[in-house]
Structures are given as C-alpha cells and as structure tokens.
C-alpha cells in the first residue's frame, strides 16, 4: 500500500528531551506535515523497527521512511543500532541521517562506513534546525525517490 | 693484599734477584782474577827466572870456552898480550856465576813458594848447574897450576856435555812450566765459562720470575678492572640492576663495593623516577580525558541555552519590556562568549590528544588553505607569503598552528590601518641551545609571522603563550586566550619551539622553529 510522500513517517532516536521537542517544533515551523515518532535509545529503536513490546501495533508505530539517529544514547548507542539496522536485509533500505552533537572526524568516518546516509551536526540555533528539517524533507521526500514505503513487512 | 703492597713485593723480589746476579757476577770475576793472579805472580816470574838461569849458565859456558881457547892460544905462543883478555874472561865468568846464583835463588824461591811439588826439578837443575860451575872452576884452577892443551880439550868436552844436559833440563823445566801454564789457562777458561753460564742461568731465572710476578700482578688488577669497566658500560646502557662480584681485599675490591652501592642507589632512584613518570603520565591522561569529556559535555547544555534563548527572543521578545529584552541580549552575549571558550577548549583538547600521523607537509599549501579560511579580504588585510618548506609534521596540527598565528596577526590589527602580515622562512642547521630531539642532521626551519598590528609590551612575550592568558579585555578583542597556547603546544610536540617579539604599537613577530624531519622518537609524548 503506497502512501503519499508528505505522509512518510519520520522516526527520531534521541535521548535528549529538549532535542525531541525542538525537532517537533522545527517540523511545525517548516510547515511539514510528516508524522514524527520518537524513541529514546538504541534498544527502543530496534524494538520499534521490529514491532516488539510496546511498538507491536503497526498502526501506532508505522514503518519510518527516514530515521534521524543520535549517536550518544544510553543502553544501546547509535553506532550499534546503526550497525544492526544496516545488517538486516529488511531494514537496510531505510535512509538513516545521523543527527548528533559530535563533529569528530572519527565519528563521521565510522558512521558512513557503517552505512549512514548522511551526517549532520546538530545546529546551534533554532533557525538552522528549521532549515535542516526543511532541507531534509525536501531532499528525501521531494527530490529523491525512496523505495516502497508501506507498513507491510 | 693492597695494590701498593703488591707492587712493593714485586719490586723487592726483582731487587733481590738483581742482588743475587750481582753477587754471582762478583764471585765469578774473583775466580777469574785469582787464576790470572796465579799466572802473573807465579808463572811469569818463574819463566823469567829460568830464562835468566839459562842465560847465566850459557854465559858461564861461553866465557869458559873462550877462556879455555885463549889459554890454549897463549900456550901455543900465538898471543902476545893474553893476560888482559884472560882476566876479562875470568871476570865475566865470576859475574855470570853471581847472576846464576841469584837467578837460581829466585827460581828456587818461587818454586818453594808456589810449586813445592817441583822441588825435585830444582834439585836436578842444581846438580846440573853445579856440574857446569865445577867444570868452569876446574879450568881456572888448571890455569893457575899450569895446564896442558889436552886438559883444556878435556874440560871443554866435559863442559859441552854439561851444557847439553843442563839445557835439556832447562828445556824440561820450561815445558813443565808451559804445561802448568796450559793448565792454568784451562782453569781460567773454565772459571770464565762457569761465570758466563751461571750469569745466563741467573738472568733467565730472574726474567722468568719477574715475568711471572708481573703477570700475576697485572691479572690481579686487570680482570677486576675489566669487570668493573664492563659493568659500567652495562649500567651506562641502562642495566642499573647490574652488580659486580670482586672478592679481593684491595682498593679494587673497595671500588667494587662502592660501585655496587652506587648502582643500587641509581636503581632505587630510577625506580622512583619511573613510578613518578607513570603516575604523571596517568594523571596527564586523566586530565586530558577530563578536558575532552568536560569540554564536550559542556557543549550540550550550552547548545540548549543558545537554542532556547533564540526561541525566547524570536517568539516572546515583543511581550517583554525594554529591560527584559536587554537581559535577553546580555544573556545571549554571555552564552556566545561561553561558546567561544568551550570551542577553544575543545580545539585544545583535540590538538593535544589526537596526535595524527607524521607525513611530509607542504607548509605553503597549509598557509594558503588557512588564508582561504580566514577571509583576509573581509578585514582589508594583505598577507605576503615567501617560499615555505615541506617538513615532516601532522598536517591538521600544522593547520591549527598557522591558523592560530595568522588569525592572531589579523585579529590584533590597528583600528586605523589595514592589517599586513609577512611570512618568511630561513633554514637553520644545528640549532643552538636546543637539545637533540632525535631529528637527523639537526636541520631546522625558522618560520616568522610578522604583523603591523598593535603589538605588545616586551615583558609579556612569554605570558601570551600561557593558558587563558589575555592582554586585552574580551570586549576589545574576543577569544579565550588559548590560541597561542595551542600554537606553542603544537610546535613543542614537533620538537620545535615558538617565541614572540613585540613593541606596543609596532606590530608583533612570532618565530616558529620546526625540525625538517621527524624520527619516530621525534614526536614527543603529548601532555
């Protein structure tokens, strides 16, 4: 079941409540109507993608068309989650944009090697964050053709 | 035994041997001398006496013959004045007899003194001599009585027989003496031979004894000293646990004891140093780690401050009074300053903890990249870059270094004058006053970054490199006061140095010295 592009759900994995709030506000500020779902660590991210535990119902937890991934998270960090997702035949097609405070060359290199699609350092000001959201939506949902975005596995 | 005593004993033994040689030598010379004296005091006078005796006897015979001849002539009436000639011959005979007696006494005397065993020869010779004297005396006696020509002839014949037997006897005596002389000569030769052999034997013995004692002495000194020398070399090479075992009770034994004490103390102090170094290294690493983590973690809440501050201002500034908006403004400035500080700290932490790989780096390219980043045109600045070398370095750190120096030069410009920066380079061989850091050939490049900015007072030329050290308020010139600290840290970690010269209002000059090449040891430990 194909869905409209503007309805492509975004999944954000970030342990920082403020960042989650800002991401939601920036999405609104950019007038994007995509639903955004949140998980707080790598464990939860994988639970979500595999529809385990509290994410068992696909209606509440639709398959995302784009994942925004923070690297430094408790329990299972972004690097490990990234590795597991990209190792899974059924999940590796989902584009993953690393959105982190890190600027370290080492992190950039390693995450691209693990299969990340983009690496963005979290902007310092709100305006920049809005720009990032706009650009991301424009690129991934307008310019680029994504593979099937449906809730069937 | 003490080394001094060893030498003393060695000397004494050699001296004793030399005295032995001397005694032997003197004895041998004495023996030869005795033999020689025998010849000169005894044999030679004996020969002379026998010779004199023969001479006297022959003269008696000759004169007697002449006497007899002249007597016979007179008898025949051939000679007119025969009286004087006869008297002359008679006198001759008498004097010869005297000489004969005298010589015989001397001969007998010598034989009695030195050759008692030859007394029989004296007796025999005496009898033969007396025969001659008797015959001679008979002739003179006949003359007085009146003598016939036949008598004279008879006497002459007797005299001839006497002469022959006497001369035979003399010949026997002489050959006997000659035999004695031969024996004496043999004795002298024998004594000399003995002396020479003994001397050679004693000399050889002395040489061997001295050689053995010298070898023993040398060994007793050489081997312990060699042991000590080897141990010293090992200690010099770092094996401080090395000790030597020398049991001798001499000065070298004492030296070995002191040596072991020294190496023990060195070892203890080195262990102390090593553990201190390890502790220092640990605490340095902890500090670096702390800096890295804290500066990184500080960024997170700061970002939020900026984020929410921005949102607050954007969305709610209108709802506030002027004072409220001023507060937000001030808060945001403080946050911005905090961000600069933390950014510098992060840079410092990155530069000091992430030593990258050392590769040949073209400094000219680095400087041009830095100039592009710095946007020199925006401040109407001009940068003149002369030819810069390629050196072994960490490229990222070189970028930080020149970014810091050029950025500094542009930042502290005069308000009424566009900045002008000059970058030069000179090659220095064997940089004086710099400890060898392992860079081969000791080839260094001195790169100067000179500006026409506000300069500084000479007394601050060291302080400006200190951490968080600023000469100006942050409202005049921003920055955390870390930039030059980073520059110095980079220069020093490459085995180089950095100094500054300046005068207020007359610009500043930064002098960076960097080695042309790095060995593996060249990159000093960070921290």
Image (tube, rainbow, N blue to C red):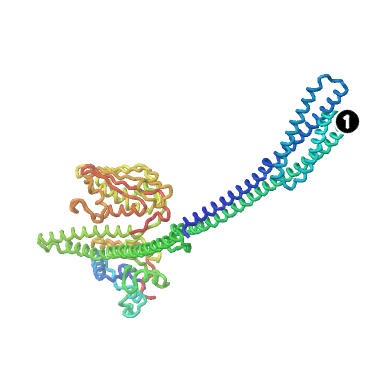
Residue B398 screen position, x and y as percent? 35, 52
Residue B82 screen position, x and y as percent? 81, 22
Question: Which of B486 and B409 lies nearest the eye of the viewer?
Answer: B486
In the current view of this chain or complex, which residue is farthest to the top?
A: B80
* Chain under numbered label 1: B
Residue ID at (77%, 46%): B120
- Residue A137 showing in the rendered view: no
Q: Is residue A100 left or right of residue B231?
A: left
- Residue B434 showing in the rendered view: yes
Residue ID at (67%, 43%): B36
Residue B260 screen position, x and y as percent? 42, 62
Question: Which of B46 and B9 lies nearest the eye of the viewer?
Answer: B46
Residue beneath disc 1: B153
Q: Is residue B13 left or right of residue A131?
A: right
When asked about the image quadrant of residue B281, the answer is: bottom left
Please determine whether, in this image, residue B154 is positioned above or below residue B222: above
Residue ID at (52%, 53%): B12
Question: Which of B182 and B58 lies nearest the eye of the viewer?
Answer: B58
In the current view of this chain or complex, which residue is farthest to the right?
A: B150
Q: Is residue B399 left or right of residue B334?
A: right
Q: Secondary structure at mark 1?
A: helix
Residue B100 screen position, x and y as percent? 74, 35
When asked about the image quadrant of residue A43, the answer is: bottom left
Q: Is residue B318 left or right of residue B133?
A: left
Q: Residues within 10 Å of mark 1 (few under 14, many from 20)?
A: some
Which part of the image, by quadrant, shows the C terminus of chain B?
bottom left
Please determine whether, in this image, residue B139 is positioned above or below residue A110: above
The count of marks equals 1
């Amino acid at each position: 079941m194909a869905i409209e592009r503007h309805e492509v759900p975004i999944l954000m994995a970030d342990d920082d409540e403020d960042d989650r709030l800002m991401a939601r506000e920036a999405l609104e500020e950019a007038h994007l109507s995509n639903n955004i779902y949140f998980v707080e660590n790598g464990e939860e991210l994988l639970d979500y993608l595999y529809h385990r535990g509290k994410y068992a119902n696909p209606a509440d937890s639709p398959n995302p068309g784009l994942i925004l991934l923070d690297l430094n998270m408790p329990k299972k960090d972004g690097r490990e989650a990234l590795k597991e997702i990209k190792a899974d035949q059924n999940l590796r097609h989902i584009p993953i944009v690393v959105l982190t405070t890190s600027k370290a060359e080492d992190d950039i290199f390693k995450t691209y090697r693990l299969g990340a699609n983009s690496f963005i350092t979290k902007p310092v000001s709100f305006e920049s964050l809005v720009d990032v959201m706009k650009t991301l939506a424009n690129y991934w949902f307008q310019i680029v053709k994504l593979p099937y975005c449906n809730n069937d596995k | 035994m003490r080394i001094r005593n060893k030498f003393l004993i060695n000397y004494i033994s050699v001296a004793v041997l030399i005295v032995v040689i001397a005694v032997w030598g003197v004895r041998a010379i004495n023996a030869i001398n005795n033999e020689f004296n025998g010849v000169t005091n005894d044999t030679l006078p004996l020969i002379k006496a026998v010779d004199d005796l023969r001479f006297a006897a022959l003269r008696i015979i000759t004169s007697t013959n002449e006497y007899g001849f002249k007597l016979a002539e007179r008898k025949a009436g051939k000679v007119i004045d025969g009286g004087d000639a006869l008297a002359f011959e008679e006198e001759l005979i008498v004097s010869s007899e005297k000489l004969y007696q005298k010589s015989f006494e001397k001969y007998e005397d010598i034989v009695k003194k030195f050759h008692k065993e030859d007394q029989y020869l004296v007796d025999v010779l005496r009898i033969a001599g007396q025969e001659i004297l008797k015959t001679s005396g008979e002739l003179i006696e006949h003359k007085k009585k009146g003598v016939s020509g036949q008598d004279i002839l008879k006497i002459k014949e007797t005299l001839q027989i006497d002469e022959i037997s006497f001369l035979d006897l003399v010949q026997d005596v002489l050959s006997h003496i000659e035999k004695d002389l031969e024996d004496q000569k043999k004795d002298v030769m024998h004594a000399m031979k003995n002396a020479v052999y003994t001397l050679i034997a004693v000399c050889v013995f002395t040489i061997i004894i001295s050689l053995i004692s010298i070898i023993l002495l040398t060994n007793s000194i050489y081997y312990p000293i060699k042991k000590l020398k080897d141990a010293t070399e090992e200690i010099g090479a770092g094996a401080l646990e090395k000790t030597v075992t020398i049991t001798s009770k001499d000065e070298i034994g004492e030296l070995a004891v002191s040596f072991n004490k020294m190496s023990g103390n060195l070892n203890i102090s080195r262990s102390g140093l090593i553990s201190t170094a390890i502790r220092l290294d640990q605490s340095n690493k902890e500090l670096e780690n702390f800096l890295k983590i804290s500066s990184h973690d500080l960024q997170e809440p700061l970002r939020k401050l900026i984020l929410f501050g921005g949102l607050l201002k954007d969305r709610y500034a209108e709802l506030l009074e002027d004072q409220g908006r001023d507060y937000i403004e001030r808060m945001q400035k403080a946050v911005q300053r905090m961000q600069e500080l933390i950014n510098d700290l992060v840079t410092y932490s990155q530069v000091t903890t992430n030593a990258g790989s050392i590769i040949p780096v073209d400094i000219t390219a680095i400087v041009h990249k830095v100039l592009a980043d710095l946007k020199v045109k925006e401040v109407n600045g001009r940068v003149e870059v002369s030819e810069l070398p390629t050196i072994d370095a960490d490229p990222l750190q070189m970028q930080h270094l020149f970014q810091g120096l050029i950025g500094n030069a542009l930042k502290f410009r005069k308000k009424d004058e566009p900045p002008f920066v000059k970058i030069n380079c000179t090659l220095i061989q064997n940089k004086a006053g710099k400890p060898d850091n392992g860079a081969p050939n000791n080839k260094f490049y001195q790169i100067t970054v000179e500006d026409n900015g506000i300069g500084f007072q000479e007394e601050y030329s060291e302080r400006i490199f200190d951490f968080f050290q600023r000469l100006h308020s942050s409202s005049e010139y921003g920055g955390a006061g870390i930039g030059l600290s980073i520059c110095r840290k980079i220069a020093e970690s490459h085995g180089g140095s950095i100094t500054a010269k300046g005068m207020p209002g007359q610009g500043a000059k930064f002098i960076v010295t960097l080695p042309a090449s790095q060995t593996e040891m060249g990159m000093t430990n960070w921290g």
